[in-house]
Image (tube, helix red, strand yellow):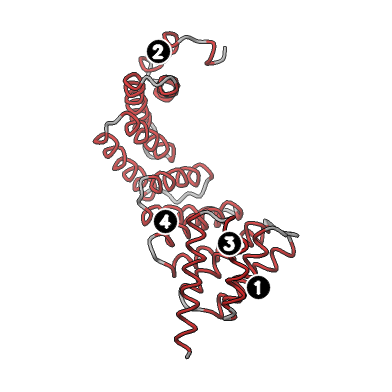
């Protein structure tokens, strides 16, 4: 039977039975289904009740999985469920438990398996959603290192990109450009030309913000090459050209091109380009 074939009373019984025999993960899944169900019909009191029950079961499951990456994932789920239920004190307790599980894994034998990399990605995403970009960057970089050392190049590229985004958001542009470069190089090795071009553009724009125009120009040329190899004719080709013009100091031409495509960019990335223009103007003024 599918979950939709059961009544809410049936699912409550399934959850309670799973809880009674110590199958905490199954219990959490049943309670989470109820949380989502009551949320969908705007029954907030019941949604909160089953969110709390989901969190409690995830906590128990995490303790059972202590010492494994699974404990991190279950603790993240617990924290998110308690937040949904409005129990912020328990959510904070779960957050501290995540760090305990992370520390326990680091103290054990080194491991680079996909389960750990996935758990670190989940942990990093949770920290981003909580607004803690600095710690998220550390977790993403740890995951990226593990992925790279275990030969998962494409996965490492995505994690480096995530770390770069976090470092950029907290203003650590030196670290951001380093991780964007690692991401771009990894994507290029995997022939993911769109992602490579996009990452090289971010490298170039970040170098411009740092006032490193020669490095920015080199990154822009790599972005252009990736666009050529991947036969990418959409906005990335235009953006790589804008990066190149900025690196060369051709501000008016770059601005003209940017005005034609900036509506295609989200606020976050449009701001990065605008900051790059400001840095390029400042750099040009300092020359004269």
CB within 8 Å, label 4 to label 2: no
Contact (CB < 8 A) between labels 3 and 1?
no
Label 3: how many residues lie within 10 Å, few (<14), some (14-19) or many (20+)? Answer: many
Residue at image point 50% right, 41% down: 115
Residue 8 image offset from top left, x and y in percent:
43, 11
Mark-to-mark CA distance, 4 and 2: 39 Å
Point out the tag, 2 or 1, that comes first from the N-terminus.
2
Q: Position of residue 64 (x, y in %)?
A: 36, 30
Q: Nearer the viewer, residue 28 or 64?
A: 28
Contact check, label 4 and label 3, Cβ < 8 Å: no
Vertical placement of residue 29 versus 127, above or below: above
Residue under the point 46% across and 68% down: 275
Q: Which residue shows up at 42% across the image and 38% down it?
A: 73
Label 2 sits on a secondary structure element that is helix
Residue 66, which numbered label? Answer: none
Of the image marks 3 and 1, the number of the one nearer the N terminus: 3
Q: Quadrant of residue 63?
A: top left
Camera-side mark, 2 or 1: 1
For marks 2 and 1, give the CA distance: 59 Å
Q: Which residue is mark 2?
A: 12
Tell me the SS state at disc 1.
helix
Q: CA distance from mark 3 to mark 1?
A: 12 Å
Residue 7 in picture, x, y percent from top left? 47, 9
Label 4, on which residue?
A: 137
* Residue position marked by numbered label 3 in the rendering: 199
Query: Mark 4, residues whose alpha carbon is within 10 Å: few (<14), some, or many (≥20)?
Result: many
Which SS class for mark 4? helix
Alpha carbon distance from label 2 to label 3: 47 Å
Earlier in the chain: of badge 4 and badge 3, it is 4
* Residue matched to label 1: 221
* N-term mark: 4 or 2: 2
């Amino acid at each position: 039977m599918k979950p939709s074939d059961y009544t809410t009373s049936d699912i409550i019984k399934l959850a309670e039975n799973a809880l009674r025999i110590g199958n905490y993960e199954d219990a959490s899944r049943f309670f989470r289904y109820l949380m989502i169900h009551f949320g969908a019909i705007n029954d907030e009191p019941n949604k909160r009740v089953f969110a709390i029950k989901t969190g409690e079961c995830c906590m128990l499951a995490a303790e059972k999985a202590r010492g494994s990456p699974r404990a991190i994932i279950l603790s993240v789920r617990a924290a998110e469920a308690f937040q949904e239920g409005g129990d912020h004190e328990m959510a904070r307790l779960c957050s501290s438990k995540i760090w305990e599980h992370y520390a326990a894994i680091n103290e054990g034998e080194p491991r680079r398996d996909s389960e750990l990399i996935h758990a670190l990605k989940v942990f990093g995403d949770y920290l981003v959603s909580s607004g803690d970009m600095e710690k998220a960057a550390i977790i993403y970089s740890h995951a990226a290192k593990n992925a790279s050392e275990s030969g998962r190049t494409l996965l490492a590229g995505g994690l480096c990109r995530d770390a770069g985004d976090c470092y950029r958001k907290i203003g650590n542009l030196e670290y951001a450009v380093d991780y964007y470069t690692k991401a771009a190089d990894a994507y290029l090795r995997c022939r993911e030309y769109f992602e490579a071009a996009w990452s090289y553009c971010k490298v170039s724009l970040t170098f411009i913000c740092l006032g490193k125009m020669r490095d920015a120009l080199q990154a822009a040329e790599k972005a252009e090459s990736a666009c050529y190899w991947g036969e990418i004719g959409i906005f990335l080709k235009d953006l790589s050209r804008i990066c190149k013009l900025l690196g060369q100091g051709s501000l008016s031409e770059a601005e003209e091109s940017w005005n034609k495509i900036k509506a295609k960019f989200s606020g976050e990335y449009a701001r990065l380009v605008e900051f790059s223009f400001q840095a390029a103007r400042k750099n040009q003024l300092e020359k004269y």
